[in-house]
Protein backbone atom coordinates (compact mmCIF):
# COMPACT_ATOMS: atom_id res chain seq x y z
CA UNK A 1 0.00 0.00 0.00
CA UNK A 2 1.37 3.40 -0.87
CA UNK A 3 1.14 6.33 1.54
CA UNK A 4 2.84 7.05 4.81
CA UNK A 5 5.57 4.70 5.99
CA UNK A 6 5.68 3.04 9.41
CA UNK A 7 8.33 5.56 10.51
CA UNK A 8 6.04 8.35 9.36
CA UNK A 9 3.17 7.02 11.46
CA UNK A 10 5.46 6.72 14.50
CA UNK A 11 6.65 10.29 13.96
CA UNK A 12 3.07 11.55 13.69
CA UNK A 13 2.11 9.66 16.82
CA UNK A 14 5.01 11.10 18.86
CA UNK A 15 4.31 14.68 17.73
CA UNK A 16 0.55 14.28 18.36
CA UNK A 17 1.27 12.88 21.82
CA UNK A 18 3.53 15.83 22.70
CA UNK A 19 0.92 18.33 21.46
CA UNK A 20 -1.78 16.52 23.44
CA UNK A 21 0.37 16.57 26.60
CA UNK A 22 0.97 20.32 26.15
CA UNK A 23 -2.77 20.87 25.64
CA UNK A 24 -3.61 18.97 28.81
CA UNK A 25 -0.87 20.77 30.81
CA UNK A 26 -2.12 24.19 29.65
CA UNK A 27 -5.81 23.42 30.19
CA UNK A 28 -5.12 21.97 33.63
CA UNK A 29 -3.27 25.14 34.61
CA UNK A 30 0.06 23.36 35.16
CA UNK A 31 1.69 25.87 32.78
CA UNK A 32 1.27 29.62 33.29
CA UNK A 33 -0.80 31.02 30.33
CA UNK A 34 1.45 34.09 30.34
CA UNK A 35 4.28 31.78 29.23
CA UNK A 36 2.57 29.23 26.96
CA UNK A 37 -1.01 28.93 25.71
CA UNK A 38 -2.78 25.71 24.68
CA UNK A 39 -1.96 24.43 21.16
CA UNK A 40 -5.64 24.70 20.16
CA UNK A 41 -5.54 28.39 21.10
CA UNK A 42 -2.34 28.81 19.10
CA UNK A 43 -4.03 27.22 16.09
CA UNK A 44 -7.12 29.38 16.55
CA UNK A 45 -4.87 32.45 16.82
CA UNK A 46 -3.09 31.50 13.59
CA UNK A 47 -6.41 31.04 11.77
CA UNK A 48 -7.73 34.38 13.04
CA UNK A 49 -4.56 36.15 11.90
CA UNK A 50 -4.89 34.68 8.44
CA UNK A 51 -8.63 35.29 8.21
CA UNK A 52 -8.41 38.90 9.41
CA UNK A 53 -5.88 39.77 6.71
CA UNK A 54 -4.15 42.19 9.03
CA UNK A 55 -0.88 40.25 8.82
CA UNK A 56 -0.97 39.51 5.12
CA UNK A 57 1.44 42.36 4.32
CA UNK A 58 4.22 41.33 6.75
CA UNK A 59 3.81 37.68 5.75
CA UNK A 60 4.16 38.52 2.06
CA UNK A 61 7.08 40.84 2.79
CA UNK A 62 8.94 38.09 4.65
CA UNK A 63 8.18 35.41 2.06
CA UNK A 64 9.27 37.64 -0.81
CA UNK A 65 12.49 38.54 1.05
CA UNK A 66 13.18 34.86 1.64
CA UNK A 67 12.41 34.04 -2.01
CA UNK A 68 14.82 36.72 -3.26
CA UNK A 69 17.58 35.75 -0.82
CA UNK A 70 17.19 32.05 -1.71
CA UNK A 71 17.08 32.68 -5.47
CA UNK A 72 20.15 34.90 -5.35
CA UNK A 73 22.08 32.46 -3.16
CA UNK A 74 21.23 29.53 -5.45
CA UNK A 75 22.36 31.34 -8.60
CA UNK A 76 25.47 32.95 -7.09
CA UNK A 77 26.29 29.86 -5.01
CA UNK A 78 26.13 27.62 -8.07
CA UNK A 79 28.42 29.95 -10.00
CA UNK A 80 30.82 30.20 -7.05
CA UNK A 81 30.89 26.41 -6.66
CA UNK A 82 31.67 26.00 -10.32
CA UNK A 83 34.49 28.58 -10.13
CA UNK A 84 35.94 26.83 -7.06
CA UNK A 85 35.83 23.54 -8.95
CA UNK A 86 37.47 24.94 -12.06
CA UNK A 87 40.19 26.85 -10.17
CA UNK A 88 41.75 24.44 -7.67
CA UNK A 89 44.40 26.97 -6.56
CA UNK A 90 41.75 29.51 -5.76
CA UNK A 91 39.83 26.80 -3.97
CA UNK A 92 42.86 25.88 -1.84
CA UNK A 93 43.25 29.55 -0.92
CA UNK A 94 39.55 29.84 -0.07
CA UNK A 95 39.33 26.57 1.89
CA UNK A 96 40.11 28.00 5.38
CA UNK A 97 37.58 30.80 4.83
CA UNK A 98 34.90 28.39 3.69
CA UNK A 99 35.60 26.01 6.57
CA UNK A 100 35.13 28.76 9.15
CA UNK A 101 32.38 30.64 7.32
CA UNK A 102 29.49 29.61 9.56
CA UNK A 103 31.49 30.57 12.66
CA UNK A 104 31.06 34.22 11.66
CA UNK A 105 27.89 35.89 13.04
CA UNK A 106 26.77 37.35 9.73
CA UNK A 107 24.18 39.62 11.40
CA UNK A 108 26.99 41.99 12.40
CA UNK A 109 27.07 43.08 8.77
CA UNK A 110 23.52 44.48 8.96
CA UNK A 111 24.69 48.09 9.66
CA UNK A 112 27.05 47.82 6.71
CA UNK A 113 24.21 46.62 4.48
CA UNK A 114 22.05 49.54 5.62
CA UNK A 115 24.84 51.89 4.58
CA UNK A 116 25.15 50.09 1.25
CA UNK A 117 21.50 49.50 0.39
CA UNK A 118 19.55 51.98 2.53
CA UNK A 119 16.82 51.39 5.08
CA UNK A 120 14.64 49.06 3.02
CA UNK A 121 14.22 45.32 2.43
CA UNK A 122 17.59 44.79 0.74
CA UNK A 123 19.75 44.63 3.89
CA UNK A 124 17.58 41.74 5.09
CA UNK A 125 17.75 40.05 1.70
CA UNK A 126 21.53 40.46 1.90
CA UNK A 127 21.59 38.87 5.38
CA UNK A 128 19.56 35.91 4.09
CA UNK A 129 21.77 35.72 1.01
CA UNK A 130 25.13 35.64 2.81
CA UNK A 131 23.74 33.11 5.25
CA UNK A 132 22.65 30.78 2.44
CA UNK A 133 25.07 31.26 -0.43
CA UNK A 134 27.97 29.23 0.93
CA UNK A 135 25.79 26.17 1.51
CA UNK A 136 24.89 26.21 -2.19
CA UNK A 137 28.49 26.85 -3.27
CA UNK A 138 29.90 24.00 -1.16
CA UNK A 139 27.27 21.53 -2.33
CA UNK A 140 27.81 22.54 -5.95
CA UNK A 141 31.55 22.05 -5.52
CA UNK A 142 31.02 18.67 -3.91
CA UNK A 143 28.62 17.66 -6.68
CA UNK A 144 31.11 18.52 -9.44
CA UNK A 145 33.93 16.78 -7.61
CA UNK A 146 31.94 13.59 -7.19
CA UNK A 147 31.03 13.11 -10.81
CA UNK A 148 32.62 9.70 -11.48
CA UNK A 149 35.64 9.91 -13.77
CA UNK A 150 34.20 7.06 -15.82
CA UNK A 151 31.24 9.26 -16.82
CA UNK A 152 33.61 11.89 -18.19
CA UNK A 153 35.46 9.16 -20.09
CA UNK A 154 32.14 7.84 -21.35
CA UNK A 155 31.31 11.32 -22.62
CA UNK A 156 34.63 11.34 -24.53
CA UNK A 157 33.93 7.86 -25.87
CA UNK A 158 30.52 9.07 -27.08
CA UNK A 159 32.14 12.12 -28.68
CA UNK A 160 30.06 14.57 -26.64
CA UNK A 161 31.03 18.23 -26.82
CA UNK A 162 32.00 19.97 -23.55
CA UNK A 163 28.57 21.63 -23.44
CA UNK A 164 26.77 18.33 -24.04
CA UNK A 165 28.92 16.69 -21.38
CA UNK A 166 27.99 19.40 -18.88
CA UNK A 167 24.27 19.42 -19.64
CA UNK A 168 23.64 15.74 -20.30
CA UNK A 169 26.06 14.02 -17.93
CA UNK A 170 27.71 16.28 -15.36
CA UNK A 171 24.66 18.22 -14.16
CA UNK A 172 22.36 15.16 -13.93
CA UNK A 173 25.12 13.28 -12.16
CA UNK A 174 25.56 15.96 -9.50
CA UNK A 175 21.83 16.74 -9.26
CA UNK A 176 21.45 15.21 -5.75
CA UNK A 177 24.17 17.54 -4.40
CA UNK A 178 22.68 20.51 -6.21
CA UNK A 179 19.30 19.68 -4.75
CA UNK A 180 20.76 19.47 -1.24
CA UNK A 181 22.35 22.89 -1.83
CA UNK A 182 19.00 24.25 -3.00
CA UNK A 183 17.24 22.85 0.05
CA UNK A 184 19.82 24.24 2.48
CA UNK A 185 19.82 27.61 0.73
CA UNK A 186 16.07 27.97 1.16
CA UNK A 187 16.24 26.92 4.81
CA UNK A 188 19.19 29.22 5.56
CA UNK A 189 17.56 32.11 3.71
CA UNK A 190 14.48 31.63 5.93
CA UNK A 191 16.61 31.60 9.08
CA UNK A 192 18.65 34.64 7.99
CA UNK A 193 15.66 36.76 7.00
CA UNK A 194 13.43 35.86 9.98
CA UNK A 195 16.24 36.28 12.51
CA UNK A 196 17.21 39.59 10.89
CA UNK A 197 13.63 40.82 11.10
CA UNK A 198 13.34 39.59 14.66
CA UNK A 199 16.39 41.47 15.94
CA UNK A 200 17.13 44.25 13.51
CA UNK A 201 14.13 45.20 11.39
CA UNK A 202 10.91 47.20 11.76
CA UNK A 203 8.77 45.07 9.45
CA UNK A 204 8.06 41.46 8.48
CA UNK A 205 6.96 38.31 10.22
CA UNK A 206 10.00 38.14 12.52
CA UNK A 207 9.44 41.73 13.65
CA UNK A 208 5.71 41.04 14.31
CA UNK A 209 6.58 38.02 16.46
CA UNK A 210 9.07 40.10 18.48
CA UNK A 211 6.52 42.95 18.80
CA UNK A 212 3.79 40.57 20.04
CA UNK A 213 6.28 39.06 22.50
CA UNK A 214 7.17 42.45 23.91
CA UNK A 215 3.44 43.32 24.16
CA UNK A 216 2.59 40.08 26.03
CA UNK A 217 0.18 39.26 23.16
CA UNK A 218 0.56 35.50 23.34
CA UNK A 219 -2.28 34.67 20.96
CA UNK A 220 -0.69 36.74 18.19
CA UNK A 221 2.85 35.65 18.99
CA UNK A 222 2.04 31.93 19.02
CA UNK A 223 -0.31 32.34 16.07
CA UNK A 224 2.47 33.89 13.99
CA UNK A 225 4.90 31.23 15.17
CA UNK A 226 2.48 28.50 14.10
CA UNK A 227 2.08 30.14 10.69
CA UNK A 228 5.84 30.41 10.30
CA UNK A 229 6.38 26.81 11.33
CA UNK A 230 3.65 25.82 8.88
CA UNK A 231 5.39 27.63 6.00
CA UNK A 232 8.84 26.30 6.81
CA UNK A 233 7.67 22.79 7.74
CA UNK A 234 5.46 22.49 4.63
CA UNK A 235 8.21 23.70 2.34
CA UNK A 236 10.77 21.46 3.95
CA UNK A 237 8.52 18.40 3.65
CA UNK A 238 7.95 19.18 -0.02
CA UNK A 239 11.69 19.50 -0.66
CA UNK A 240 12.37 16.38 1.39
CA UNK A 241 9.90 14.32 -0.62
CA UNK A 242 11.45 15.52 -3.91
CA UNK A 243 14.92 14.75 -2.62
CA UNK A 244 13.83 11.32 -1.46
CA UNK A 245 12.34 10.54 -4.87
CA UNK A 246 15.59 11.64 -6.50
CA UNK A 247 17.68 9.39 -4.26
CA UNK A 248 15.31 6.42 -4.42
CA UNK A 249 15.52 6.34 -8.20
CA UNK A 250 19.30 6.18 -7.90
CA UNK A 251 19.20 3.51 -5.24
CA UNK A 252 21.02 5.80 -2.83
CA UNK A 253 23.99 6.14 -5.19
CA UNK B 1 39.35 -27.14 -34.93
CA UNK B 2 43.00 -26.45 -35.70
CA UNK B 3 45.49 -28.11 -33.45
CA UNK B 4 46.18 -25.36 -30.98
CA UNK B 5 49.67 -26.76 -30.50
CA UNK B 6 50.49 -25.74 -34.04
CA UNK B 7 48.87 -22.38 -33.43
CA UNK B 8 51.21 -21.39 -30.67
CA UNK B 9 53.48 -19.26 -32.77
CA UNK B 10 52.45 -15.65 -33.25
CA UNK B 11 50.20 -15.08 -36.25
CA UNK B 12 51.93 -12.94 -38.84
CA UNK B 13 50.74 -9.34 -38.67
CA UNK B 14 51.51 -8.34 -42.21
CA UNK B 15 48.02 -8.21 -43.75
CA UNK B 16 47.51 -5.48 -46.28
CA UNK B 17 45.05 -3.32 -44.38
CA UNK B 18 44.79 -3.93 -40.64
CA UNK B 19 41.62 -2.63 -39.05
CA UNK B 20 43.63 -0.77 -36.45
CA UNK B 21 47.36 -0.24 -36.29
CA UNK B 22 49.75 0.93 -33.63
CA UNK B 23 53.31 1.83 -34.55
CA UNK B 24 56.05 2.75 -32.11
CA UNK B 25 53.59 3.99 -29.52
CA UNK B 26 54.86 5.10 -26.14
CA UNK B 27 52.99 6.92 -23.44
CA UNK B 28 54.78 8.79 -20.67
CA UNK B 29 52.75 10.44 -17.92
CA UNK B 30 54.40 13.74 -17.05
CA UNK B 31 55.82 14.31 -13.58
CA UNK B 32 53.34 15.56 -11.01
CA UNK B 33 54.08 17.48 -7.81
CA UNK B 34 56.66 15.34 -5.98
CA UNK B 35 56.61 12.49 -8.48
CA UNK B 36 58.73 11.38 -11.41
CA UNK B 37 57.43 10.95 -14.99
CA UNK B 38 55.90 7.51 -15.50
CA UNK B 39 56.79 5.63 -18.65
CA UNK B 40 53.60 3.59 -18.89
CA UNK B 41 53.87 1.73 -22.19
CA UNK B 42 55.93 1.23 -25.23
CA UNK B 43 57.33 1.25 -27.67
CA UNK B 44 54.43 -0.87 -28.94
CA UNK B 45 53.53 -2.22 -32.37
CA UNK B 46 50.24 -3.98 -33.01
CA UNK B 47 47.99 -4.76 -35.96
CA UNK B 48 44.39 -5.67 -35.24
CA UNK B 49 42.84 -7.62 -38.09
CA UNK B 50 39.31 -6.88 -39.18
CA UNK B 51 36.86 -9.07 -37.27
CA UNK B 52 39.37 -10.68 -34.92
CA UNK B 53 39.03 -11.06 -31.16
CA UNK B 54 42.22 -9.88 -29.54
CA UNK B 55 42.89 -9.91 -25.81
CA UNK B 56 45.61 -8.20 -23.84
CA UNK B 57 46.87 -9.65 -20.58
CA UNK B 58 49.63 -8.36 -18.36
CA UNK B 59 50.60 -7.69 -14.77
CA UNK B 60 48.86 -4.95 -12.81
CA UNK B 61 50.13 -1.51 -13.73
CA UNK B 62 51.72 -2.62 -16.99
CA UNK B 63 49.80 -0.09 -19.07
CA UNK B 64 46.99 -2.24 -20.51
CA UNK B 65 44.41 0.47 -19.96
CA UNK B 66 46.83 3.09 -21.26
CA UNK B 67 47.12 1.04 -24.44
CA UNK B 68 43.31 1.10 -24.76
CA UNK B 69 43.20 4.84 -24.10
CA UNK B 70 45.77 5.52 -26.80
CA UNK B 71 44.18 3.14 -29.30
CA UNK B 72 40.74 4.66 -28.76
CA UNK B 73 41.87 8.27 -28.93
CA UNK B 74 41.03 8.96 -25.28
CA UNK B 75 44.72 9.79 -24.77
CA UNK B 76 47.46 10.94 -27.09
CA UNK B 77 50.60 8.83 -27.42
CA UNK B 78 53.80 10.54 -26.38
CA UNK B 79 55.43 9.02 -29.45
CA UNK B 80 54.24 6.87 -32.33
CA UNK B 81 51.10 6.66 -34.43
CA UNK B 82 47.69 5.06 -34.17
CA UNK B 83 45.42 4.36 -37.12
CA UNK B 84 41.86 3.12 -37.38
CA UNK B 85 40.58 2.06 -40.81
CA UNK B 86 43.54 3.79 -42.38
CA UNK B 87 42.87 7.14 -40.67
CA UNK B 88 45.10 8.58 -37.94
CA UNK B 89 43.61 8.65 -34.43
CA UNK B 90 44.55 11.96 -32.87
CA UNK B 91 43.16 12.63 -29.40
CA UNK B 92 39.52 12.02 -30.30
CA UNK B 93 37.54 8.80 -30.37
CA UNK B 94 36.82 8.05 -34.05
CA UNK B 95 33.36 7.24 -35.34
CA UNK B 96 32.93 3.46 -35.36
CA UNK B 97 34.84 2.87 -32.12
CA UNK B 98 32.89 1.79 -29.04
CA UNK B 99 34.34 1.53 -25.54
CA UNK B 100 33.14 -0.33 -22.46
CA UNK B 101 34.91 0.50 -19.20
CA UNK B 102 35.60 -1.63 -16.16
CA UNK B 103 33.70 0.68 -13.83
CA UNK B 104 29.93 0.95 -13.87
CA UNK B 105 29.29 3.72 -16.39
CA UNK B 106 25.51 3.46 -16.48
CA UNK B 107 23.65 6.72 -15.94
CA UNK B 108 21.74 6.29 -12.68
CA UNK B 109 19.21 9.02 -13.49
CA UNK B 110 18.03 7.31 -16.70
CA UNK B 111 15.99 4.15 -17.17
CA UNK B 112 17.58 1.13 -18.80
CA UNK B 113 15.91 2.02 -22.10
CA UNK B 114 17.03 5.65 -21.98
CA UNK B 115 20.54 4.60 -21.02
CA UNK B 116 20.77 2.38 -24.07
CA UNK B 117 19.24 5.02 -26.34
CA UNK B 118 21.45 7.84 -25.05
CA UNK B 119 24.09 7.80 -27.78
CA UNK B 120 21.60 7.35 -30.60
CA UNK B 121 19.34 10.20 -29.52
CA UNK B 122 22.34 12.48 -29.16
CA UNK B 123 23.09 11.78 -32.81
CA UNK B 124 19.55 12.83 -33.77
CA UNK B 125 18.42 9.42 -35.01
CA UNK B 126 14.72 8.91 -35.80
CA UNK B 127 12.83 7.51 -32.81
CA UNK B 128 11.61 4.45 -34.74
CA UNK B 129 15.18 3.49 -35.58
CA UNK B 130 16.26 4.16 -31.98
CA UNK B 131 13.45 1.90 -30.78
CA UNK B 132 14.43 -0.93 -33.07
CA UNK B 133 18.12 -0.82 -32.19
CA UNK B 134 17.61 -0.41 -28.46
CA UNK B 135 15.06 -3.19 -28.19
CA UNK B 136 17.28 -5.53 -30.16
CA UNK B 137 20.37 -4.67 -28.09
CA UNK B 138 18.57 -4.98 -24.77
CA UNK B 139 16.97 -8.29 -25.63
CA UNK B 140 20.31 -9.54 -27.01
CA UNK B 141 21.95 -8.67 -23.68
CA UNK B 142 19.09 -10.29 -21.72
CA UNK B 143 17.67 -7.00 -20.46
CA UNK B 144 14.46 -6.99 -22.48
CA UNK B 145 12.32 -7.32 -19.36
CA UNK B 146 14.03 -4.41 -17.59
CA UNK B 147 13.56 -1.53 -20.01
CA UNK B 148 11.74 0.62 -17.43
CA UNK B 149 14.03 -0.27 -14.51
CA UNK B 150 16.77 2.04 -13.27
CA UNK B 151 20.41 0.94 -13.00
CA UNK B 152 20.17 0.93 -9.20
CA UNK B 153 17.63 -1.88 -9.51
CA UNK B 154 20.01 -4.08 -11.53
CA UNK B 155 22.85 -6.33 -10.42
CA UNK B 156 26.46 -5.44 -11.23
CA UNK B 157 26.51 -7.89 -14.14
CA UNK B 158 23.28 -6.51 -15.56
CA UNK B 159 24.59 -2.95 -15.33
CA UNK B 160 27.70 -3.99 -17.20
CA UNK B 161 25.52 -5.66 -19.84
CA UNK B 162 23.58 -2.40 -20.07
CA UNK B 163 26.82 -0.53 -20.76
CA UNK B 164 27.68 -3.07 -23.46
CA UNK B 165 24.18 -2.66 -24.94
CA UNK B 166 24.59 1.12 -24.93
CA UNK B 167 27.79 0.71 -26.93
CA UNK B 168 26.33 -2.02 -29.12
CA UNK B 169 23.43 0.12 -30.40
CA UNK B 170 25.91 2.44 -32.07
CA UNK B 171 27.11 -0.57 -34.10
CA UNK B 172 30.83 -0.09 -33.48
CA UNK B 173 33.24 -1.65 -35.93
CA UNK B 174 35.95 -1.71 -33.29
CA UNK B 175 34.85 -2.63 -29.78
CA UNK B 176 37.30 -1.87 -26.96
CA UNK B 177 36.57 -3.53 -23.63
CA UNK B 178 38.56 -2.49 -20.56
CA UNK B 179 38.15 -5.36 -18.08
CA UNK B 180 34.38 -5.18 -18.37
CA UNK B 181 33.84 -8.27 -16.22
CA UNK B 182 36.50 -7.47 -13.65
CA UNK B 183 34.01 -6.91 -10.85
CA UNK B 184 31.94 -10.05 -11.53
CA UNK B 185 32.13 -13.53 -10.01
CA UNK B 186 33.67 -16.39 -11.96
CA UNK B 187 30.43 -18.05 -13.10
CA UNK B 188 28.94 -14.78 -14.27
CA UNK B 189 32.13 -13.94 -16.08
CA UNK B 190 32.05 -17.23 -17.99
CA UNK B 191 28.44 -16.61 -19.00
CA UNK B 192 29.19 -12.99 -19.91
CA UNK B 193 32.04 -14.33 -22.01
CA UNK B 194 29.53 -16.46 -23.93
CA UNK B 195 27.37 -13.37 -24.48
CA UNK B 196 30.39 -11.47 -25.70
CA UNK B 197 31.29 -14.22 -28.18
CA UNK B 198 27.71 -14.21 -29.48
CA UNK B 199 27.87 -10.46 -29.85
CA UNK B 200 31.20 -10.65 -31.63
CA UNK B 201 29.90 -13.25 -34.09
CA UNK B 202 26.69 -11.36 -34.77
CA UNK B 203 28.23 -7.93 -35.26
CA UNK B 204 31.43 -8.96 -37.00
CA UNK B 205 33.19 -6.21 -35.05
CA UNK B 206 36.86 -6.28 -34.22
CA UNK B 207 37.19 -6.72 -30.45
CA UNK B 208 40.07 -5.77 -28.19
CA UNK B 209 39.62 -7.01 -24.65
CA UNK B 210 41.79 -5.91 -21.74
CA UNK B 211 41.67 -8.49 -18.97
CA UNK B 212 43.47 -9.75 -15.91
CA UNK B 213 42.01 -13.22 -16.30
CA UNK B 214 44.15 -15.61 -18.34
CA UNK B 215 41.33 -18.14 -18.71
CA UNK B 216 39.04 -15.43 -20.06
CA UNK B 217 41.64 -14.35 -22.58
CA UNK B 218 42.38 -17.95 -23.61
CA UNK B 219 38.70 -18.81 -23.99
CA UNK B 220 37.51 -15.76 -25.89
CA UNK B 221 40.35 -14.76 -28.15
CA UNK B 222 41.74 -15.47 -31.57
CA UNK B 223 44.99 -13.95 -30.35
CA UNK B 224 46.29 -12.95 -26.95
CA UNK B 225 48.97 -10.32 -26.43
CA UNK B 226 51.03 -10.76 -23.27
CA UNK B 227 52.47 -7.53 -21.93
CA UNK B 228 55.55 -7.05 -19.81
CA UNK B 229 55.75 -5.18 -16.53
CA UNK B 230 55.87 -1.40 -16.93
CA UNK B 231 56.73 0.04 -19.36
CA UNK B 232 54.44 -2.44 -21.08
CA UNK B 233 55.55 -4.01 -24.34
CA UNK B 234 54.28 -7.17 -26.01
CA UNK B 235 56.40 -10.14 -24.95
CA UNK B 236 54.34 -12.74 -26.78
CA UNK B 237 51.43 -12.92 -29.21
CA UNK B 238 49.63 -16.22 -28.83
CA UNK B 239 47.25 -17.46 -31.54
CA UNK B 240 44.66 -19.76 -29.98
CA UNK B 241 43.35 -21.38 -33.12
CA UNK B 242 39.79 -21.66 -31.82
CA UNK B 243 36.98 -21.88 -34.34
CA UNK B 244 34.69 -18.84 -34.63
CA UNK B 245 31.77 -20.86 -33.24
CA UNK B 246 32.86 -21.39 -29.65
CA UNK B 247 31.61 -20.91 -26.14
CA UNK B 248 32.69 -21.36 -22.54
CA UNK B 249 32.63 -25.17 -22.91
CA UNK B 250 36.01 -24.70 -24.52
CA UNK B 251 37.51 -24.58 -21.03
CA UNK B 252 37.28 -28.38 -20.94
CA UNK B 253 39.38 -28.66 -24.10
CA UNK B 254 42.87 -29.97 -23.50
CA UNK B 255 44.37 -27.17 -25.60
CA UNK B 256 42.76 -24.58 -23.35
CA UNK B 257 44.98 -25.72 -20.50
CA UNK B 258 48.07 -25.55 -22.68
CA UNK B 259 47.27 -22.04 -23.89
CA UNK B 260 46.55 -20.80 -20.37
CA UNK B 261 49.79 -22.42 -19.17
CA UNK B 262 51.75 -20.69 -21.90
CA UNK B 263 50.22 -17.33 -21.01
CA UNK B 264 51.03 -17.87 -17.34
CA UNK B 265 54.56 -19.02 -18.12
CA UNK B 266 55.25 -15.71 -19.86
CA UNK B 267 53.36 -13.65 -17.35
CA UNK B 268 54.63 -15.11 -14.09
CA UNK B 269 58.05 -13.47 -14.17
CA UNK B 270 56.53 -10.15 -15.22
CA UNK B 271 53.95 -10.31 -12.43
CA UNK B 272 56.72 -10.92 -9.90
CA UNK B 273 58.64 -7.94 -11.30
CA UNK B 274 55.51 -5.85 -11.12
CA UNK B 275 54.83 -6.86 -7.51
CA UNK B 276 58.43 -6.22 -6.50
CA UNK B 277 58.32 -2.69 -7.92
CA UNK B 278 54.90 -1.95 -6.42
CA UNK B 279 53.37 -1.29 -9.84
CA UNK B 280 50.15 -3.01 -8.88
CA UNK B 281 49.25 0.01 -6.85
CA UNK B 282 50.77 2.60 -9.14
CA UNK B 283 48.99 4.67 -11.73
CA UNK B 284 48.36 2.75 -14.89
Image (tube, coloured by chain):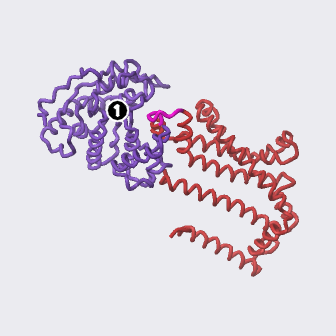
Chain colours: A red, B purple
| Dot 1 alpha-carbon crowd within 10 angstroms: few under 14, some 14 to 19, many 20 or more | many
Image height check: is A201 above or below B100?
A: below
Relative to the observer, which residue lies in front, A106 or B198? Answer: B198
- Tell me the SS state at disc 1: strand
Query: Residue shown at 40%/45% (left/top)?
Result: B133
From this viewpoint, is residue B28 visible? no
Locate residue B220, reporting x and y percent.
Answer: 24, 39
Locate residue A227, reporting x and y percent.
Answer: 75, 64
Relative to the observer, which residue lies in front, B37 or B77? Answer: B77
Task: Tell whether B4 sits left or right of A7.
Answer: left
Query: Residue shown at 35%/41% (left/top)?
Result: B180
All told, the count of numbered labels is 1
From this viewpoint, is residue B31 visible? yes
Task: Tell whether B83 sits left or right of B49.
Answer: right
Image height check: is B148 above or below A23?
A: above
Locate residue A219, reporting x and y percent.
Answer: 82, 70
For disc 1, the chain is B
Locate residue A79, reporting x and y percent.
Answer: 65, 38
Query: Residue shown at 58%/32% (left/top)?
Result: A88
Q: Is residue A156 magenta?
A: yes
Relative to the observer, which residue lies in front, A95 or B218? Answer: B218
Q: In which quarter of the image is residue A144?
A: top right
Relative to the observer, which residue lies in front, B127 or A252? Answer: B127
Q: Give the range drawn in magenta.
A: A155-161
Image height check: is A11 above or below A162?
A: below
Q: Find disc 1 in the rendering and name its residue.
A: B174
In the image, farthest residue toward the bottom: A28
Image height check: is A45 above or below B269?
A: below
Amino acid sequence: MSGMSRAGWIRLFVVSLLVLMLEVACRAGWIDPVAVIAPTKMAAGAWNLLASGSYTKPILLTLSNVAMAAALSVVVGFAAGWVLYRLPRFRRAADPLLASYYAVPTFIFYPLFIVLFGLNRWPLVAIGFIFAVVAMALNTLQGFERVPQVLRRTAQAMRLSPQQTLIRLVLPSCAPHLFTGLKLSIVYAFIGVIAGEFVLSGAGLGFEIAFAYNSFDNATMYGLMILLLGFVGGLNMLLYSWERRLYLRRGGR
Amino acid sequence: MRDPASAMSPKPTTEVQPHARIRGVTRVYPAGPGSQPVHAVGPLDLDLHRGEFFSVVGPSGCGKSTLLDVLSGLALPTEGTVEFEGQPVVGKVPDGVGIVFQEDASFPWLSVYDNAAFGLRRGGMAEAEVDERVEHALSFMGLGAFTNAYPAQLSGGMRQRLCIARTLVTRPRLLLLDEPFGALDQQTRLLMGDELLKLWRETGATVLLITHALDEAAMLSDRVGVMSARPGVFLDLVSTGWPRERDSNIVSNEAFGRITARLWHTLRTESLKSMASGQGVARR
